[in-house]
Amino acid sequence: MSSPSVQRRSDYTPPAFYVDAVSLDIVLADHATRVSAVLQVRRTTPNTAHMTLHGHPSVVLEGVTLNGTPWHDFEHTDDRLLIRNCPDTFELVITTTISPADNTAFEGLYKSAGAFCTQCEAEGFRRIVFYPDRPDVLARFTTRITAPKKEYPLLLSNGNRVKEEDLGGGVHRVTWVDPVPKPSYLFALVAGDFDCLRDYFVTASGKEVALELYVDRGMLHRAHHAMESLKHAMRWDETRFSLEYDLGIYMIVAVDFFNMGAMENKGLNIFNAKYVLADRETATDQDFMNIEAVIGHEYFHNWTGNRITCRDWFELSLKEGLTVFRDQEFSADRGSRAVHRIKNVRMIRSHQFREDAGPMAHPIRPEEVIEMSNFYTVTIYEKGAEVIRMIHTLLGENRFQEGMQTYVRRHDGHAVTCEDFIAAMEAGSGEDLTQFRRWYSQAGTPEVRASYEWDRAQKTLRLTLCQKTPPTADKSPKKPLHIPVNTALFSKTGERIPLVRAQTRQNEVLSLQQATQTWVFEEVDTAPVVSLFRGFSAPVRLIHPLETEDLHVLILHEEDDFSRWDAWQMLLKKEIVAMVSAMQGGKTVQVPPSVCEIAAALVEDQSLDPAFVAEMLTLPAESELAGWFDTVPVEAIHHVRQALRDGVAHGCASVFSARYAALHQDSFEMTTAAMAQRSLRNTLLGYLALVPSGSDQVAQHFAMATSMTDSIGALEAAIFGGCSCRDRLLEEFAHRWSKDGLVMDKWFSLQAVAPAMDTLKRVKELMNHPTFDHTNPNRVRSLIGAFTARNHRCFHAEDGTGYRFLREQIELLNSRNPQVASQLIDPLLQFARYDLPRRTCMVEQLHTLRAMPDISSDIYEKVHKALK
Ligand code: TYR
């Protein structure tokens, strides 16, 4: 095949033709769905004679009519339709046939467990009908859906249901009108038989909104949490952002087959069922929190994404970075801010930093794209959110909200750019963000090196920060960035020392703008401990050689819980790196007593949030530890982490055991406090599993479990503790839940991440389990993806079995579902950081993939960049 073409941000041109309104007529059938689209078109560029519409090879063109007469002056290629010699304004009718039942890529219109549904972002609409499928063409949609009534009693689309007709012969038809102009990527259609949970919401200005949540039949009892989350999200957006919902109805449909998490289609969100269905028996506390976050995310898109959308896909972070920031704030306001922040930062440090260091490195606003689906990345989403958060840190809440109001006022109803957003933030706040803009164009993780001198006689502290961004694969230029550095000083006994310069108390956020910058603080009359990037005020790697005793001060006395955790991470890093080099030097590794002392003190401290303590006790994952080394010592990392866990478990056994017992809950509650207690209790169990009699305790925990959180806590402890009860518990669990795919996903994942060397064999056996279904993205990710992305040691087995396994799976998925194939491939792209035998084998797999005759553009782009 010819290599897929590269799109460049700089090539943007406005559309030559606008579609003001489109009327879709869709007659559903498994293999021959007929679509006819009536477009009201208007020329916007005088000298363009021909109109381009996007398409896809799977779409059969049946006919073209222009202003009522059949039109033959067009060119039709695989993925384009060029209507030649168009008048200034015209009505264009395009008729196509598609086969949703054969659509295994789940882009466009497809069948999911007996229901029809759509996924149009980014470029799925063109798989339904030829259309100017770009986000800057906004049209009013009318959608008429026709289908057999018995199988598909519900026919849904965006907007308001304006007409229902019985056509006789068991066929019915429903017409929807969406009053708000929208780009085609926000179009949605669902046809099927669902149960519906109904509720309503009264907006701040008193408008009543009907809320409808559609789930598989028999699943209503698992829909309540999602509905509550939706109402919380609606209220929160009014109070924190003054943004109110605009339509009279908000629908959410949960489907079983979905490539991503969820989709914000206007008025009709479509969700992966994983982010809707939950009750205490089948979902863990973490699932409950994830659902609230994703429901919030999609809801917040109604303003930041739908009413104000992206001009083109290079601007994706305009809506995603901002909306992730909003959903993170929502979660933080609803639960424990520090714990949520810790989780976000773990994600950035393990996944985003790795992406920046690998072949797919890109700025949050990329310059070049081959396959847009490949850019739904941690960089666009999570780093994008960090960039918004830095703006928030620089402006403060009030000025940030003024900037937001300006953004909404200026751009409501339009398709805009990141530049428009920053300009609005500047106008609303009065802040100059000229240099700050570089965060949008530069890829890479800046390194900030800190050094300081305390002058005892002068009572001054000279703090020097140097920033440097290492080169990245995309070769974007690296200039000094505007980096907010939230800073605090403490005495060695933990008292806060104010920041004073020129005899005035300083703001705690320093603006680092030059390559090297120095600040001199006065009135520092005792040797200080410097705390930098509090709350992770910028997505950088901090190189800050703090002495162990200074880290102890921060761990014990920092006022910001996030920074306590961060100091603890620095300490762990120091110890782990030392242990790894001891092990590589053939010495026995020893867990420093101070680590156990701190762990025990944390667990004994009743004043701390138990969820925070649980985070403190959770060691960085092997894949995150891997990022600390130039050449990843796969086995040593595994053994050192294990040794550390063992050492803490044995050193703290009695303290942990006592707190574990004290955290027992007599009754189940779904409150933040109760969840925090369960979190700590299950974390402690993970350690207790490692000491003698651990297996009995784990078995008992499992037997007494009254929630999925505790059942999974026991299974996890059994697996990572190598407990003798493990197989029995796994079997009991499977026996109870084998009919429930979403629950079994947890069971698949836990076995796939087991550190034992025969795990791959087990994974292959599980692929024949009756509940496993290689066509379902959730199943594939929970078994295959968990092994390849989260079982660092076994995936990187020296004999290359893990690498070959992943290559085979990608070969199978490449043509069936390229998006999911592409989601899986990332661990193979990291070869440069592994030793020669491993690297050679990984590269071999990539060469094999590159030679696939039908290689998808998704896989092509990643393999090509990796092998360049
Ligand atoms: N826009 C979706 C979100 O809320 C993500 C998404 C993107 C979903 C592409 C599906 C898809 O195919 O983040």
Image (cartoon, rainbow, N blue to C red):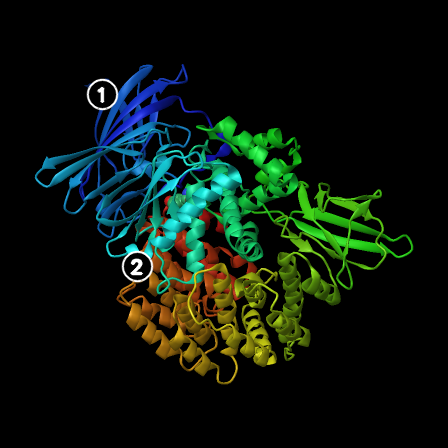
- The reply to whether residue 840 is visible in this rendering is yes
Q: Which mark is residue 71?
A: 1
* Residue, far right: 457
Ligand 1 lies under 8 Å from the Cβ of mark 2: no
Dot 1 falls on a residue whose secondary structure is loop
Query: Which residue position holds label 2?
Result: 774
Disc 1 crowd, CA 10 A, few/some/many (<14, 14-19, 20+) = some
Q: Is residue 736 left or right of residue 514?
A: left
Question: Which is more foreground, mark 2 or mark 1?
Answer: 2
Point out the image quarter for the N terminus: top left
Amino acid at circle 1: Trp
* Relative depth, front residue between 583 and 651: 651
> What is the C-alpha distance between the residues marked 2 and 1?
44 Å
Disc 2 crowd, CA 10 A, few/some/many (<14, 14-19, 20+) = some
Q: Which mark is residue 205?
A: none
Q: Are marks 2 and 1 in contact (CB under 8 Å)?
A: no
Dot 2 falls on a residue whose secondary structure is loop
Query: Residue 295 at what x, y percent from top left?
Result: 41, 48
Is residue 693 placed above or below 463 in the rendered structure? below
* Residue, far bottom: 692
Q: Is residue 286 left or right of residue 616?
A: left
Q: Quadrant of residue 618?
A: bottom right
Q: Quadrant of residue 117?
A: top left
